[in-house]
Image (tube, rainbow, N blue to C red):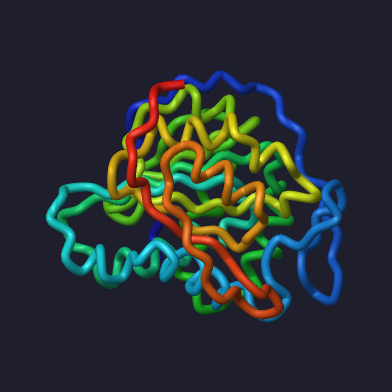
């Protein structure tokens, strides 16, 4: 498959230096040494993405009946790109052909290209889509501009740096949030109230979120900025997860 890329409008991010991920392999899966945590469930990362983020945000139903010309997802923690590719696959399968998916992801410690390639090789059913990401990855990291992929049906923005800082410079209205930082106990910066305040600023009534964790502080912080929260049975070994919707418009922060 020939990979085509097209630049679109740039974000106001000016990160020129970043700290790459320190990754090791355990039992054939990538593991973040810095945070002593996994990138995805050891049970099945692909099924986890579908269950937690796609189903947790009710995306199949929302996309089948989509009337708007675009839909925006924002993610905390790009990681191996598994969430992005799974989302793209579903989008291309069921969303209206004229609609555009905006996918905005913040990542403070991006994988290098070799580690990303090895990580995505674990999912052969996504190979058709992963080659697009791999072909544009270096450009995404160094030029900090959104790229139009998949015949202009998907616009990907990879924001390199602290998530709170990056989203403070973002102005898209977000329809769905993927909260996928490492666990709150190991990476608390990805779950702090300041980040959730930026979530609220970028959300509107009806915007949704989903996350693998059910930590009490995460739930309270989300509720404090205007999201209703609901516990749901977690994926794999996780007892519970959280999902919810913006029900009250918070003040700008």
On the question of residue 208 being in view, the answer is: yes
Q: Look at the picture and state if 175 lies above or below 40.
A: above
Horizontal and vertical percent position of residue 218: 62, 48
Horizontal and vertical percent position of residue 131: 51, 61
Report the front residue among 20 and 175: 175
Report the front residue among 76 and 144: 76
Q: Is residue 20 left or right of residue 239?
A: right
Query: Which residue is located at x 84 percent, y 76 percent?
Result: 27
Report the front residue among 30 and 130: 30
Horizontal and vertical percent position of residue 217: 66, 47
Q: Quadrant of residue 215?
A: bottom right
User: From the image, which quarter does the N terminus lie in?
Assistant: bottom left
Query: Which residue is located at x 50 percent, y 53 percent?
Result: 178
Query: Which residue is located at x 49 percent, y 45 percent?
Result: 223
On the question of residue 4 being in view, the answer is: no
Q: Look at the picture and state if 142 lies above or below 32.
A: above
The number of discs equals: 0
Q: Is residue 141 left or right of residue 112?
A: left
Farthest left residue? 67
């Amino acid at each position: 498959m020939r990979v085509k890329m097209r630049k679109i409008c740039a974000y106001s991010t000016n990160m020129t230096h970043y700290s790459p991920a320190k990754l090791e392999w355990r039992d054939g899966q990538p593991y973040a040494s810095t945070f002593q945590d996994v990138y995805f469930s050891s049970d099945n990362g692909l099924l986890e993405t579908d269950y937690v983020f796609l189903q947790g945000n009710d995306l199949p139903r929302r996309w089948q009946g989509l009337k708007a010309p675009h839909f925006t997802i924002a993610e905390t923690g790009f990681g191996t790109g598994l969430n992005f590719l799974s989302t793209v696959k579903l989008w291309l399968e069921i969303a209206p052909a004229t609609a555009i998916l905006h996918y905005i992801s913040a990542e403070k410690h991006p994988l290098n290209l070799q580690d990303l390639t090895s990580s995505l090789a674990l999912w052969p059913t996504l190979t058709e889509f992963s080659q697009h990401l791999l072909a544009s990855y270096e450009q995404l990291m160094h030029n900090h501009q959104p790229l139009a992929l998949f015949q202009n049906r998907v616009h990907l923005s990879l924001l390199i740096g602290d998530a709170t800082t990056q989203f403070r410079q973002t102005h898209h209205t977000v329809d769905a949030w993927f909260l996928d930082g490492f666990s709150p106990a190991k990476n608390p910066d990805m779950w702090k109230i300041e980040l959730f305040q930026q979530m609220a600023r970028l959300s509107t009534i009806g915007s949704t979120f989903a996350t693998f964790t059910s930590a009490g502080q995460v739930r309270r912080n989300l509720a404090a900025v205007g999201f209703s929260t609901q516990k749901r049975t977690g994926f794999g070994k996780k007892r519970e997860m959280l999902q919810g919707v913006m029900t009250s418009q918070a003040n700008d922060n």
